[in-house]
Image (cartoon, rainbow, N blue to C red):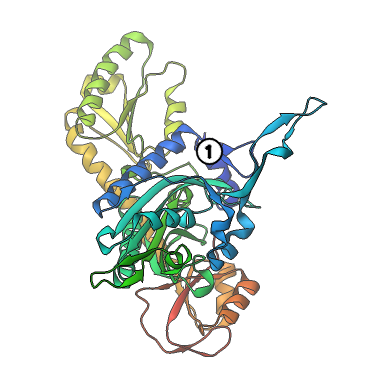
């Protein structure tokens, strides 16, 4: 099945698109720019969602849901916010259709909305309108709410999972009594995202501040995690925003503090989306298909019988079900694929394409010898082990696979992170290998814009751990106090 994939070294973009479709993750919808997430793709998203949800709740957050539609007037209350999203907004103007005299379905012009509604591109405005009614005193704070939802941002150029007009995400929105609490929340959540990326997705990331040009619209500070894909491009995998009192002032959300003084509430917002699906694919997959870290694999182990006739299958099924039930009792997801409509070779290729971490094969000789063949997806290696050792071997193997995928990604990031000190080398490195480039920048928006215009590379973030280091900006030659992270990106 993998032979239908374009070689990723020949055409990375086409390889990615082929893989998303051939592995049954998603497909383009008839609605321009939108996607259909198919069951296998959605199962991976559900794993991501479930693990993140546990992390959010472990840090004191609760889930709620707010309307999909936002009155247009809400956007005008926060100038930077409306400017940031104006070009991406879908607007509802009418609420009814009718049949014309020609029998065509048309908009009923008499059913025009008194106020146009924006289809949610993000929820700060609608949520802070609610918070105004919820907050009167310091006793009402903090509010720590997360929402799992869909959003719409009208994109001109789309790519499955990476950039679509409608996508799924979570958005946290918190309210605090002090600046310090809000800033601590902003840092806490970017750390949660970074930990999830590494420990579950097996993707090492760089944490840092966004430059002023790259901040979220309406934020005082934006923190981000940046991941490096196998083609040398960066992917912003999550953001956390310190919103200051901007939205509280826009919606007049004030509270009485412990001293009886009236003050505006401090805010944060943070989110990740189905873009993480794209990151999972591009960080690990190969020309044979997906490589899914076991912690996020909907199916961790598949058992494939190799037999001739129902007589042989009966014995294998008994052995397979014993293994399946024993592994499931240990919290491992297992499928016994006894379909008689496909040959073992087809099944091997199918599960390789779909990135199932471990494949167990049982043939006639295995039944005789009480053995099984175990294949791991990350290395494509196989070994024959005693069937009696399977319950000890497989859990350890899954842990080893998870760790190996992460180690490989860490090594790739290390080998493709470069320190560059002049413009010529900067251009050469971008065009040659891409990757993360640590270089000096003079701190001005003008220089940042010029670099982006001339190279399509952007400042991905100013890493938290970037030490003070005197140097000269690679573009302007002006003094710089530290290196920042540049890359071309998705």
425 vs 241: above or below: below
Residue 382's quadrant in the figure?
top left
Q: Nearer the viewer, residue 371 or 325?
A: 325
Give the tally of numbered discs.
1
Instruction: Residue 385 in the image: state x and y as whole percent.
Output: 23, 33
Residue 249's quadrant in the figure?
bottom left
Give the residue number, with chain letter if any, for mark 1.
26
Instruction: Residue 485 in the image: state x and y as whole percent.
Output: 46, 72
Rendered residue at 32%/62% (across/down):
191
- Could you tell me which secondary element the residue under label 1 belongs to? strand
Rendered residue at 37%/44% (across/down):
49
89 vs 27: above or below: below
* 394 left or right of 449 in image: left
420 vs 28: above or below: below
Residue 433 can be seen in this image: no
Callout 1: few (<14), some (14-19), or many (20+) C-alpha neighbours within 10 Å?
A: many
Instruction: Residue 355 in the image: state x and y as whole percent.
Output: 41, 39
Residue 449 can be seen in this image: yes
Q: Nearer the viewer, residue 254 or 97?
A: 254
Residue reaching furthest to the right:
102
């Amino acid at each position: 099945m993998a032979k239908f994939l374009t070689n990723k070294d020949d055409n990375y973009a086409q390889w990615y698109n082929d893989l998303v479709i051939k592995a049954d993750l998603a497909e383009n919808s008839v609605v321009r720019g939108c996607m259909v997430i198919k069951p296998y793709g959605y199962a991976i998203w559900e794993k991501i969602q479930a693990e993140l949800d546990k992390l959010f709740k472990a840090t004191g957050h609760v889930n709620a849901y707010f309307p999909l539609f936002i009155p247009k007037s809400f956007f005008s209350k926060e100038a930077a916010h409306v400017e940031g999203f104006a070009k991406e907004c879908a607007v509802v103007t009418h609420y009814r259709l009718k049949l014309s005299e020609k029998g065509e379905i048309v908009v009923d012009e008499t059913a025009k909305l008194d106020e146009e509604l924006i289809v949610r591109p993000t929820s700060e405005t609608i949520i802070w309108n609610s918070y105004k009614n919820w907050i009167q005193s310091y006793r009402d704070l903090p509010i720590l709410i997360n929402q799992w939802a869909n959003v719409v941002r009208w994109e001109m150029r789309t790519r499955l999972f990476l950039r679509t007009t409608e996508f799924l995400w979570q958005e946290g929105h918190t309210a605090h009594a002090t600046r310090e609490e809000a800033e601590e929340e902003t840092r806490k959540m970017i750390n949660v995202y970074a930990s999830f990326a590494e420990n579950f997705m097996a993707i090492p990331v760089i944490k840092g501040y966004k430059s002023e040009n790259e901040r979220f619209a309406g934020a005082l500070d934006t923190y981000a995690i940046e991941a490096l894909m196998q083609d040398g491009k960066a992917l912003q995998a999550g953001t956390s925003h310190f919103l200051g009192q901007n939205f509280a002032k826009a919606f007049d959300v004030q509270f009485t503090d412990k001293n009886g003084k009236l003050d505006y509430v401090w805010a944060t917002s943070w989110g990740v989306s189905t873009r993480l699906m794209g990151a999972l694919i591009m960080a690990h997959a190969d020309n044979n298909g997906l490589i899914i870290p076991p912690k996020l694999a909907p199916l961790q182990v598949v058992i494939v019988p190799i037999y001739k006739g129902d007589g042989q299958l009966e014995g294998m099924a008994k052995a397979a079900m014993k293994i399946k039930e024993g592994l499931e009792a240990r919290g491992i997801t297992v499928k016994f694929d006894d379909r008689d409509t496909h040959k073992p070779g087809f099944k091997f290729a199918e599960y390789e394409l779909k990135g199932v971490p471990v494949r167990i094969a049982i043939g006639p000789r295995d039944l005789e010898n009480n053995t099984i063949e175990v294949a791991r997806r990350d290395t494509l290696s196989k070994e024959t082990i005693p069937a009696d050792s399977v319950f000890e071997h497989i859990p350890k193997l899954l842990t080893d696979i998870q760790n190996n995928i992460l180690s490989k990604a860490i090594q790739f990031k290390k080998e493709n992170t470069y320190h560059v000190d002049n413009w010529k080398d900067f251009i050469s490195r971008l065009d040659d290998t891409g990757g993360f480039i640590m270089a000096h920048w003079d701190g001005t928006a003008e220089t940042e814009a010029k670099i982006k215009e001339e190279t399509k590379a952007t400042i991905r973030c100013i890493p938290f751990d970037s030490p003070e280091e005197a140097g000269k900006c690679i573009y302007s030659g002006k003094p710089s106090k530290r290196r920042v992270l540049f890359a071309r990106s998705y």
